[in-house]
Image (cartoon, helix red, strand yellow):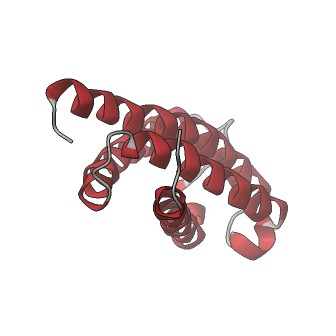
Amino acid sequence: MNLSLRAIAIPTAAGLIVWAAVTMFFRWFGHLILTSVHDERFPVIFIGLEGATGIGLYLIGLLYRKIDRSPRALLRFALIGSAVGLMLDSVSLSFHPLFFPGMNRDQVLAFTVWMAFAYGLFLIIPALQNALALTTGKR
């Protein structure tokens, strides 16, 4: 596989933008929507957040295809974007009082649970979109 600087820079930048947007969302609203994982409301909140995440990732994938129309663009976005986000989230979780000052420890744990599942979606949804684009001939 011959990767150009552009083939790495675009998904890296897109992954950074997605990470920053999600981090800011939880910085501003996390303390309002996240509960303890032991709270009876947690499953409903979790399912709602992951559903919204899935829809958001699908829409981001559609937008990303307009930026990068190469045959495996969404696969690169999924892999590189997830890697960038995971590395940055290791920092944001290590310094959670700085990144998420309004959240208590239970909410940080709930965020971590959401995050782990969301990265699974980040790997799967763009990959499915890429496979669909290749099989339908929409590059």
* 83 relative to 16, above or below: above
Quadrant of res 31: bottom right
Residue at the location (74% across, 64% down)? 92
Which percent across, then down, holds residue 6? 47, 63
Left/right placement of residue 93 relative to residue 115 reads right
Left/right placement of residue 110 relative to residue 90 reads left
Toward the right, the furthest residue is: 94
Q: Nearer the viewer, residue 93 or 84?
A: 84
Q: Nearer the viewer, residue 44 or 52?
A: 52
Q: Nearer the viewer, residue 7 or 60?
A: 7
Quadrant of res 39: top right
Which percent across, then down, holds residue 98? 77, 75
* 130 relative to 28, above or below: above
Q: In the picture, which quadrant includes the C terminus?
A: top left
Q: Is residue 26 visible?
A: yes
Residue at the location (16% across, 31% down)? 137
How many marks the image carries: the answer is: 0
Which percent across, then down, holds residue 23? 58, 65
Left/right placement of residue 109 relative to residue 30 reads right
Q: Nearer the viewer, residue 33 or 51?
A: 51
Residue at the location (55% across, 62% down)? 19
Which percent across, then down, holds residue 45? 48, 42
Q: Is residue 104 visible?
A: no
